[in-house]
Image (cartoon, coloured by chain):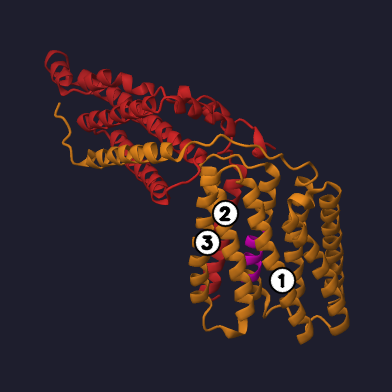
């Protein structure tokens, strides 16, 4: 128990230190001006860590006070994280008005769809309601952002590595949280009485890895804003439907491949 | 382990895999492929259509079977099937280039029609599925020469219509030719 607690404490300290370093980079490099929501998110995380350390020290890890403090502070940081992500996506796609419009719709659509799915999956399990809510949020978040990244890849838009690293970090942590929260309770709950410490440790190691990635990505100046040539709307309205019409015709032709008799030799 | 746990674990693993693919694949970094739209607009494979049509006509096989030997006809048919497969690959390249052209226009447009974009995704998925089926069919020994010719005509027709549309756009075409800029590392996306 003591060894577990010590290891979690070390990880906690390392995580706080890493967050402080990322905060420092954001201030030193002046990134907080371009990424105010991201800077707020990191700062809130830092405050959350210090705040929870105080709460756990005073009330104990398993007390109702500690639980309430943990969940409420988590909810606040999750909201901040959503704002930070939207901010990064907006910056990455600022020069692509049409694509960014598509991305926002995709983000909204997938979030709504998954929200319904998660609500259906988690219903009737009141004991784990908060757990499901937290995990569901991470799932929705990761799926929506990964869908946006896939769309960006489809259109072969080059997103600056720093923004890509920030988004990938968010997604990785959310995926890791979903897996950790899903696998560990079922696996360890009945075997190890102190499974929370293993759980906490794994979550913190994932976040620590993400912080290292962010710190590395943010060490350089952010890319400058540049204007892109924009085509008149009429070009899109004229050419893209034409291409789609022809592509559909090609596909129909392909479908007919099976119906055409093979020439006899 | 409950059903919901399994769903979450499955989705978590899938998301991690997709994230890895999106992060580490270099789909958005193909300057050599998109460095010049003029090159993309050549769509040269179509020009070999008459030769491919000739290669797949049954008259040749009848002639070889009658004047030569069945073995010779068989060998020639095998060779020509291979050529047909290569030609099918070339048609796919043309298809992809045209689709890429549409994507570049989408990227540069201030507003997109979601329905058109979704149709583009769907068409690409359909094309790839059918292409793989036909390729498999060719590998297995069938030679749907007429169907291949129809397919070639379709791509050829598309090429001509696209060229006409672009010519009508006049000066705007020159603007489109600058589309390579978003991909060549300039601007906010260059890191």
Q: Which residue lies furthest to the left in this view?
A: B66
Quarter where residue A246 is shown: top left
Left or right: residue B91 versus residue A163 is left
Please say whether residue A205 is visible from this viewpoint: no
Query: Which quadrant is home to the N terminus of chain A?
Result: bottom right
Magenta region: A173-182
Circle 1 SS class: helix
The numbered disc on residue A76 is 1
Which residue is denoted by mark 2 in the rendering? A146
Q: Which of B106 and A186 is in front in this view?
A: B106
Left or right: residue A153 versus residue A207 is left
> In the rendered structure, does residue A175 fall within the stretch colored magenta?
yes
Q: Mark 2 lies on which chain?
A: A
Query: Which quadrant is home to the C terminus of chain A?
Result: top left
Of the numbered discs 1 and 2, the one sitting upstream in the chain is 1
Of the numbered discs 2 and 3, the one sitting upstream in the chain is 3
């Amino acid at each position: 128990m003591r060894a577990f607690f010590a290891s979690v404490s070390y990880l906690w300290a390392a995580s706080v230190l890493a967050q402080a370093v990322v905060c420092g980079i954001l201030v030193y490099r002046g990134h907080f001006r371009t990424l105010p929501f991201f800077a707020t998110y990191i700062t809130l995380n830092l405050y959350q860590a210090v705040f929870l350390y105080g709460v756990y020290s005073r009330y104990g890890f398993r007390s109702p006070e500690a639980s309430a403090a943990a969940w409420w502070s988590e909810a606040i940081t999750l909201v901040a994280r959503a704002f930070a992500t939207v901010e990064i996506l907006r910056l990455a796609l600022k020069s692509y008005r049409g694509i960014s419009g598509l991305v926002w719709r995709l983000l909204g659509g997938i979030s709504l769809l998954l929200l319904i799915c998660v609500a259906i999956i988690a219903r009737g399990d009141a004991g784990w309601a908060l757990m499901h809510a937290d995990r569901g949020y991470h799932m929705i978040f990761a799926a929506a952002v990964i869908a946006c990244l896939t769309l960006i890849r489809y259109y072969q838009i080059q997103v600056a590595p720093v923004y890509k690293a920030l988004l990938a970090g968010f997604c990785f942590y959310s995926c890791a949280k979903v897996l950790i929260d899903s696998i560990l309770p079922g696996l360890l709950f009945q075997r190890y009485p102190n499974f929370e410490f293993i759980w906490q440790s794994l979550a913190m190691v994932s976040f620590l890895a993400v912080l290292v990635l962010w710190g590395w990505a943010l060490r350089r100046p952010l890319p400058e804003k540049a204007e892109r040539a924009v085509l008149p709307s009429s070009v899109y309205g004229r050419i893209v439907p034409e291409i789609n019409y022809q592509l559909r015709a090609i596909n129909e032709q392909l479908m007919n491949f099976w119906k055409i008799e093979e020439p006899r030799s | 382990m409950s059903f919901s746990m399994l769903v979450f674990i499955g989705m978590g693993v899938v998301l991690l895999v997709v994230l890895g693919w999106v992060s580490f694949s270099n789909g958005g970094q193909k300057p050599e492929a998109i460095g010049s739209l003029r090159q993309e607009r050549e769509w040269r494979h179509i020009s070999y259509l008459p030769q491919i049509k000739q290669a797949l006509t049954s008259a040749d096989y009848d002639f070889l079977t009658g004047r030569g030997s069945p073995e010779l006809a068989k060998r020639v048919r095998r060779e020509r099937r291979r050529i047909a497969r290569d030609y099918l690959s070339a048609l796919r390249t043309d298809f992809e280039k045209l689709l890429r052209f549409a994507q570049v226009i989408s990227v540069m447009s201030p507003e997109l029609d979601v329905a058109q974009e979704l149709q583009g995704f769907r068409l690409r998925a359909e094309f790839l599925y059918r292409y793989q089926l036909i390729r498999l069919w060719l590998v297995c020994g069938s030679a749907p020469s007429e169907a291949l010719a129809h397919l070639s005509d379709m791509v050829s027709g598309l090429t001509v219509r696209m060229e006409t549309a672009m010519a009508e756009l006049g000066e705007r075409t020159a603007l489109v030719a600058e589309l390579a800029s978003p991909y060549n590392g300039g601007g906010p996306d260059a890191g």
